[in-house]
Image (cartoon, rainbow, N blue to C red):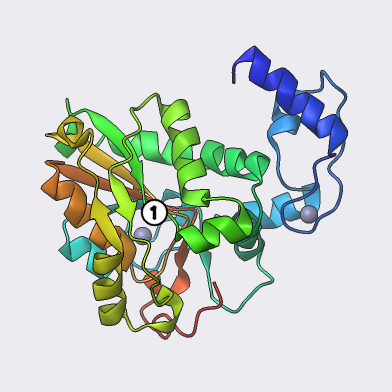
Amino acid sequence: MASGDRVMSRLADLLFPPKCACCGELLEFNGFFGSKSAQKDALCQACRLVWEKEKETQCNLCGEKVANCACSTRMMNSAGCRVHCKLVYYRPGNRETVGNRVIYRIKDHADRRTVRFLADALAPGILANMERQEWKGKSFFISWLPRRSGAVLKSGTDQAKELAVLLAKRLELPLLPLIGRRRKSQTPQKFLTPTARLSNATGAFYLREKRKEEAKGKVAVLVDDIVTSGASMTAGVRLLRRAGAKGFLAVSVASDECNRNPVLPAFSKSEI
Ligand SMILES: [Zn+2]
Ligand SMILES: [Zn+2]
């Protein structure tokens, strides 16, 4: 963070003391010049412990902890996006997990501190996957799936964009706003079956022509907040492929729990 940004963010902390993104408890104040790590935390100590445990939930497909698992959903896989970095699983309707509550927090509020915390947590896994053999010598760029404009107006934030902006800074990658979202009203994905989700997402997003040349031959790091069936990611991957992108690394804060455990019912009624 540039020093000017740092001063501004510390002043903001003084005026609006930061609260835990999960339980709302006031975070410990470490003074204007307090430790850097304390100023980056978005969770109180108790929630942080649970969050770290949630990051260790095992993926039944690869056996890794979720925060280290790169498994993609079936739909994303068939679109050629085989790498998906995430931090936790969520189960729609279960509002009590820290992961779920953090997601609701960044969806409902423009909470830069929490998004920064999530970007910091995601960056190492993305960097590790960028080192894959198949991408040796390739250039990367970051793009994101924009939120519905009505939802942006209501909440005052587009959390996927915020996350993408911070990740681009952290990873020192160019940020290309290549995906647009049509204004026409759409049925929210949560009410649809996976197949209907894909056709809905395909109609919702379009490729923005400006700067699309910059995607040619590069690997796209495509950011969203959550992945359920992977329909939106799949629609995004198809568009970026049209722009000439040659590889895809999906990034989201959370993935639906059914993506690690085929026994769970797929995409049951979502409240997200
Ligand atoms: Zn808390
Ligand atoms: Zn896995």
Drawn side of residue 221 relative to residue 111, left or right = left
Kind of residue at disc 1: Cys
Instruction: Specify the farthest residue to the front.
Output: 184
Image location (x, y in percent) of residue 155: 62, 57
- Does the image show residue 72? no
Q: Residue at x 61, y 65 (%)?
A: 100
The secondary structure type at the circle numbered 1 is loop
User: Which of these two is toward me, 210 or 197?
Assistant: 210
- Does the image show residue 37? yes
Q: Quadrant of residue 154?
A: bottom right
> Label 1 CB, ligand 2: below 8 Å?
yes
Image location (x, y in percent) of residue 44: 79, 48
Q: Quadrant of residue 184?
A: bottom left
Q: Residue at x 77, y 50 (%)?
A: 20
Image location (x, y in percent) of residue 190: 45, 77
> Compared with residue 207, is residue 172 higher up or lower down, i.e. above or below?
above
Q: Quadrant of residue 229?
A: bottom left
| Residue carrying label 1 | 69
Drawn side of residue 244 relative to residue 46, left or right = left
Quarter of the image with the N terminus is top right
Drawn side of residue 29 relative to residue 264, left or right = right
User: Which of these two is toward me, 106 or 136?
Assistant: 106
User: Which of these two is toward me, 73 or 112?
Assistant: 112
Q: Residue at x 80, y 33 (%)?
A: 13
Instruction: Specify the farthest residue to the top.
Output: 3
Image location (x, y in percent) of residue 157: 57, 50
Neighbours of disc 1 within 10 Å: few (<14), some (14-19), many (20+)? many
Q: Quadrant of ligand 2?
A: bottom left
Quarter of the image with the C terminus is bottom right
Drawn side of residue 228 relative to residue 72, left or right = right
Q: Residue at x 43, y 53 (%)?
A: 252
